[in-house]
Amino acid sequence: MAHLAEGSILDVGRYPPAFLQIFDDCVRIEVTYKKVWDDGFGARGWKLNVTIGDPEIIASTRETGPMINTSVFVHDILDHFLSGFGVSGHRSEAMALIQLSKRTGSDPRPDYEQMVKEDILKGRVNGEKLTTFLPAVLCSMLPSNTEMANKEIIVFLKKVLGENCLFELLVKNFFTRGKAGEIHAAESWRKLGLDPSKKTEIGLALQGLLNRVDFIAEETGAEMFEASITVNNEKSVLTVHDSSIPQSVYSANVA
């Protein structure tokens, strides 16, 4: 979320109004739908306006996973953006996955394992230096008088610990980094006038809206349109700013 600030912990009260507006009775989030995004992925779907231009973010649709009843787009809204975390970056994702777990009952471990295998064990970390992301116990093992590239650090640690031990320590680190954001997420929601205990219900309300509007966008073949999503503790509303969509305002009550 380079449009806002560097780092993973962000002040929701300082988001620019082009991305988020805070009212007495709700917050409004600006979003965009495109049939094909010209961002190297060519995906159909939705993006938070704040993520447009972020090379790590792929558009997402209403589709949910087999174990989670809300989509990636809802995850981006609730567990990243409104929780005061960057939308991309390994530390941000670690914290957001803990929020997803609290909201849906999902287990973050498979995602943590995937990021360790595909990124960290290859010396790649998004959003910060590898040495600031690694736990102190691993950093303390590194030679203090030698500059090492990321891949060299991982190779060195594998030799010292063995790959299986290193893997488990890196997964444990994701849990540690993720849980460190819990207080900030709750404070962010309260700052926005939202009840953290209603995350599950708000997520399901948003998913219901997305199911309806995304289906209509797909059926009508809409090329693109801008929209806004308003959220409070009682209902969510998605307003489409395009006359080609049959209905402009969709709402869902928070159970």
Image: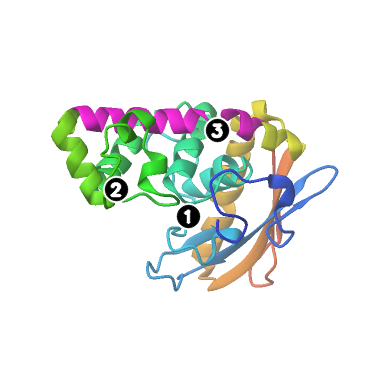
List x then y, in percent, for residue 106.
43, 29
Residue at 37% of width from left, 32% of height from top? 135
* Labelled disc at residue 119: 2
List x then y, in percent, for residue 71.
48, 45
- In the rendered image, is residue 73 in sight? yes
* Labelled disc at residue 180: none
Q: Earlier in the sequence, mark 1 or mark 2?
A: 1
List x then y, in percent, for residue 243.
69, 72
User: Is 169 inside the magenta-drawn segment?
Assistant: yes
Q: Which residues lie in the magenta part?
A: 165-186
In front: label 3 or label 1: 3
Q: Quadrant of the N terminus?
A: bottom right
Q: Dominant secondary structure of the magenta stretch?
A: helix
The three-letter code of the residue at mark 3 reads: Gly
Q: Earlier in the sequence, mark 3 or mark 2?
A: 2
User: Is 184 inside the magenta-drawn segment?
Assistant: yes
Q: Quadrant of the C terminus?
A: top right
Frontmost residue, 49 versus 93: 93
Residue on which disc 1 sits: 61
CA gap between label 3 and label 2 equals 21 Å
SS for callout 1? loop
SS for callout 2? loop
Q: Tell me, yes or no, whether the two marked residues, 3 and 1, touch with CB atoms within 8 Å.
A: no
